Image (tube, rainbow, N blue to C red):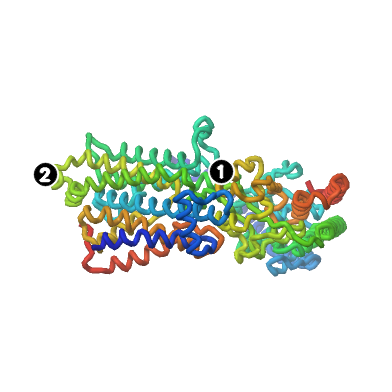
């Protein structure tokens, strides 16, 4: 097989100069790339100093430019982005986000466990997380991938307020964010002014579900919402923020109102099916059950104020002029783009 | 002597279970209410505190005793059946099957025409029945029941059923249902009503009496199938009966209390270490000791977090296991 033992002569002749040329070419490219690589961080550093924020975990986060591709990895963070007027920047939200109209077009990523690969696959220039929900350890991983991540504070109403302003600052929608934050605070103060001054507050418990009686204890934002709504939360006595109420305790304390995110399946009958001894409670006998949409209350965020209004209107109907209140809520909703 | 002491302890322990609950009630009031309730002298509906005693604590305490007693005697039966000290009521995948049944029901993954006719406890029972049937089919070979196959199939099916429960729970979009299933999987007597007791008590008594009647064959079975057979024991029939009884009692009890582990393991061994290995004593001893243990564990679970529910499965493990390990340190303990 001569063609294998000796290569064709024209190939042998051409190969030597081609090899030298290629070697020279690659060396030139390598040097050029090296120079470029050295120069690139310098440019990033210059941009990065333009925007630096301290997030809910106390981390200092620098952003090169105003982000255009934002991934929210917590429903609370999505609510804050909406309130700050930056909804069009979102490229993905989590499967835990509620199915509302303005998020319907967005792809969803797994929230539990967090689908890290999918997040990176969206090529985000900012990830927004919640300091209450998301794992702080993820920050290091995303930093290593050069993707900035901001953990928004949501421990209290003032945290939510600050998060809206901070998000507006980061997304370049300061005016919208300021307007929304001011408007929400005005709604809160107005609600408190309506419900305060009553001699005796009605008592209540808030249940996350009509099946297992998960509730909220000390340190929970839901107790704040109930107080603004003019309701005395009986579960304030629990030191844990998420107690599971015992039937005996509920019977003994006999709340005036049972509030909860009961949803479509959460009728009085289904509540009694799971807690038959509650039949003698005043709240059950008098049909004082208040259903609050889960999307408004189960995630700490700007929507919570609407939940507080709904609870107050259900518990203190005499304090509200229904037509005026509806108009007020509608106008607030439009001004803040709250669904 | 020991059995007598255990029986004597029933009343005081039940009294403790009735006296201490999630809320603090005067003991005298509890006693008076009990007496009035039994004699029919108290209009329960009008007195909320009396309702706590008669409609919550009393059925709850009785349910705890029943479940503890039932799971313990089935633990004895399972250990004799497979001649393995590691056996417990859940070893044959019964608990896993019940959990999978409950999970599928909660998540709405059971066909509608079935789901509309059952509730969660029935779904749990059907899950347990499915699991034990599969294990039985796999373990049966040539008309005989292989104990080693029974154990291996049980362990494998338990893992499979646990995977089903984990998958449907994790994949569920309904957080409320996920929470409910996770809580149920840890076991609780909160919300047990009078209507749930008759079946549970009947099945447990049936199981207890049947097993007590089989005390001698069970003793023989511990020495090996051939030895038992030579002593005139119908080994294959006995094994089948034990499996059916185990599925029935465990399935019914799990359906009212959720999955409570360790009781069926630690109580029989604890009783054996004190009363010896004869089933004539181990069975009644385990029945009473299991019931007492569960009542105390449930009382502790209510006392530990006042006003809140602490799954009793956590207490049985945290309190029972150290005690059990201490017993095992005794050098004279023997299983067979």
Depth check, front residue: A212 or B135: A212
Query: Is residue A88 among what the camera can see?
Result: no
- Which residue is most to the top? B113
Q: Which residue is mark 1?
A: A273
Q: Which residue is mark 2?
A: B230
Residue A132, relative to residue B115: is it above or below? below
Quadrant of res B3: bottom left
Left or right side of A112 for A312: right
Residue lying at 70% horizontally and 48% vertically, measured from the top left? A290
Residue lying at 53% horizontally and 33% vertically, measured from the top left? B116
Q: CB of mark 1 within 8 Å of CB of mark 2?
A: no
Query: Is residue A271 among what the camera can see?
Result: yes
Residue A39, image x and y in percent?
Answer: 74, 65
- If the image is split into quadrants, where does the C terminus of chain B sit? bottom left
Left or right side of B232 for A154: right
Residue lying at 63% horizontally and 40% vertically, measured from the top left? A265
Question: Please, which chain is the residue tagged with disc 2 on?
Answer: B
């Amino acid at each position: 097989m001569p063609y294998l033992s000796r290569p064709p002569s024209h190939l042998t002749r051409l190969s030597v100069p081609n090899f030298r040329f290629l070697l020279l070419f690659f060396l030139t490219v390598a040097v050029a790339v090296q120079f470029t690589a050295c120069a690139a961080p310098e440019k990033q550093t210059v941009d990065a100093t333009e925007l630096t924020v301290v997030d809910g975990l106390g981390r200092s986060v620098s952003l090169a430019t105003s982000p255009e591709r934002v991934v929210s990895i917590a429903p609370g963070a999505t609510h804050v982005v909406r309130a700050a007027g930056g909804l069009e920047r979102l490229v993905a939200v989590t499967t835990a986000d509620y199915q509302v109209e303005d998020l319907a077009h967005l792809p969803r990523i797994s929230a539990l466990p967090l689908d890290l690969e999918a997040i990176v696959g969206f090529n985000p220039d900012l990830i927004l997380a919640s300091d209450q929900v998301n794992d702080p350890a993820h920050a290091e991983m995303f930093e290593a991938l050069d993707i900035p991540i901001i953990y928004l504070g949501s421990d209290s109403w003032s945290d939510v307020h600050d998060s809206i302003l901070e998000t507006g600052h980061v997304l370049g929608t300061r005016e919208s964010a300021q307007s929304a934050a001011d408007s929400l605070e005005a709604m809160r103060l107005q609600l408190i002014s309506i419900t305060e001054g009553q001699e005796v507050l009605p008592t209540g418990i808030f249940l996350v579900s009509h099946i297992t009686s998960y509730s909220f204890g000390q340190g929970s934002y839901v107790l704040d919402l109930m107080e603004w709504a003019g309701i005395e939360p009986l579960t304030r006595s629990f030191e844990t923020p998420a107690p599971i109420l015992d039937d005996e305790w509920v019977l003994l304390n006999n709340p005036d109102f049972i509030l909860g995110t009961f949803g479509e399946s959460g009728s009085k009958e289904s509540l009694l099916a799971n807690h038959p001894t509650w039949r003698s409670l005043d709240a059950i006998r008098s049909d004082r059950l208040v259903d609050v949409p889960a999307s408004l209350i189960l995630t700490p965020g700007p929507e919570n104020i609407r939940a507080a209004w709904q609870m107050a209107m259900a518990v203190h109907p005499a304090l509200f002029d229904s037509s005026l209140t509806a108009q007020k809520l509608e106008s607030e909703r439009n001004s803040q783009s709250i669904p | 002597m020991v059995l007598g002491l255990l029986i004597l302890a029933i009343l005081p322990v039940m009294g403790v279970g009735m006296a201490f609950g999630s809320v603090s009630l005067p003991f005298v009031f509890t006693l008076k209410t009990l007496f009035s309730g039994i004699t029919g002298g108290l209009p329960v509906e009008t007195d909320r505190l009396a309702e706590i005693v008669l409609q919550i604590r009393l059925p709850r305490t009785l349910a705890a005793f029943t479940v503890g007693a039932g799971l313990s005697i089935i633990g004895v039966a399972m250990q004799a059946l497979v001649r393995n000290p590691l056996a417990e009521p859940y070893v044959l995948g019964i608990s896993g099957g019940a959990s999978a049944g409950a999970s599928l029901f909660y998540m709405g993954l059971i066909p509608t025409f079935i789901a509309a006719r059952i509730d969660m406890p029935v779904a749990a029972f059907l899950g347990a029945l499915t699991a034990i049937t599969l294990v039985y089919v796999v373990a049966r070979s040539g008309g005989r029941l292989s104990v080693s196959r029974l154990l291996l199939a049980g362990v494998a099916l338990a893992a499979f059923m646990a995977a089903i429960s984990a998958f449907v729970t994790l994949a569920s979009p309904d957080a409320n249902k996920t929470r409910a299933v996770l809580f149920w999987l840890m076991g609780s007597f909160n919300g047990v009503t009078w209507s749930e007791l008759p079946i549970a008590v009947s099945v447990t008594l049936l199981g207890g009496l049947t097993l007590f009647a089989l005390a001698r064959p069970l003793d023989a079975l511990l020495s090996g199938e051939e030895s038992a057979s030579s002593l005139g024991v119908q080994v294959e029939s006995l094994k089948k009966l034990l499996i059916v009884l185990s599925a029935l009692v465990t399935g019914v009890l799990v359906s009212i209390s959720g999955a409570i582990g360790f009781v069926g393991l630690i109580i029989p061994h604890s009783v054996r270490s004190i009363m010896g290995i004869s089933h004539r004593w181990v069975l009644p001893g385990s029945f009473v000791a299991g019931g007492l243990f569960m009542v105390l564990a449930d009382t502790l679970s209510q006392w530990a977090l006042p006003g809140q529910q602490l799954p009793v499965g956590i207490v049985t493990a945290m309190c029972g296991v150290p005690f059990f390990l201490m017993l095992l340190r005794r050098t004279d303990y023997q299983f067979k």
